[in-house]
Image (cartoon, rainbow, N blue to C red):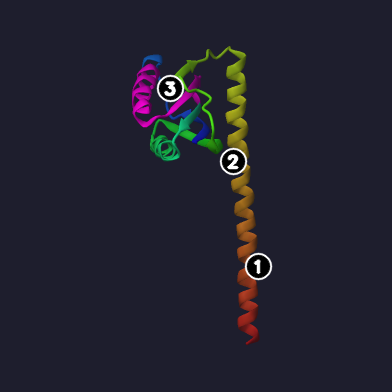
Amino acid sequence: MFKRLKYISRASKRMRPDAISALAKASAENNRRADITGILVETSGIFFQVIEGPAEAVDALFQRISADPRHQELLILNTMDNCDTRLFPQWAMQTVSLRSDDIRADAIKLLLDTAVEGQRRVQLLSGGIERFVWTEVAANQAATVETT
């Protein structure tokens, strides 16, 4: 059984193609040792990645990715536990760089922008609900104290 995790992020600063190639090579070597497979799609500073393998290895890798200052606006799109098969069994880390005028690049950019905006809205809404609930709880506690 394997775990599969999909995420998307934006590079915190522009990466040259040779830097992306070096990152992909190092990632593939590390992934082979950890029994991780997957694919990394890069376009105009946006990364879309699928990583799969033993759950502990995938979780450890994603923790490292999350702490990597080269990423910002990093969002998990999907996780699946107990996968029977891998989508990318032959790739320790296949890397695909799409030109900015590739229609697939537009879809990835739209996915990131939509996910980031959705996350921002969830944070605003949950913050408002928390403040409302806290105000109600505080008012009820004050009313309870006054009546005793």
Q: Secondary structure at mark 1?
A: helix
Q: Nearer the viewer, mark 3 or mark 2?
A: 3
Q: Position of residue 100 (x, y in %)?
A: 55, 14
Q: Earlier in the sequence, mark 1 or mark 3?
A: 3
Q: Nearer the viewer, mark 1 or mark 3?
A: 3
**Disc 3/disc 2 C-alpha distance (Å):** 27 Å
Q: Earlier in the sequence, mark 1 or mark 2?
A: 2
**Disc 1/disc 3 C-alpha distance (Å):** 51 Å
Disc assigned to residue 119:
2
Give the residue displayed 38% in from the left and 22% down from the top.
28
Compare residues 50 and 134 and report the one nearer the observer.
Answer: 50
Question: Which image quadrant for residue 121?
Answer: top right
Q: Is residue 49 left or right of residue 15?
A: right
Q: Is residue 113 left or right of residue 89?
A: right
Q: Secondary structure at mark 2?
A: helix
Magenta residues span 19-48
Q: Which residue is mark 1?
A: 136
Compare residues 82 and 5 and report the one nearer the observer.
Answer: 82
Residue 45 visible to the viewer = no
Q: Mark 3: few, some, or many residues within 10 Å (few <14, many ≥20)?
A: many
Compare residues 66 and 79 and report the one nearer the observer.
Answer: 79
Asked if the stretch drawn in magenta spans residue 88, the answer is no
Q: Is residue 58 above or below residue 132?
A: above
Q: Which residue is mark 3?
A: 93
Give the residue displayed 43% in from the left and 22% down from the top.
93
Say which amino acid is labelled 1: Glu
Q: Position of residue 106 (x, y in %)?
A: 61, 19
Question: Is label 1 in contact with label 2 (beta carbons under 8 Å)?
Answer: no
Q: Earlier in the sequence, mark 3 or mark 2?
A: 3
Say which amino acid is labelled 3: Met
Q: Position of residue 59 (x, y in %)?
A: 43, 40
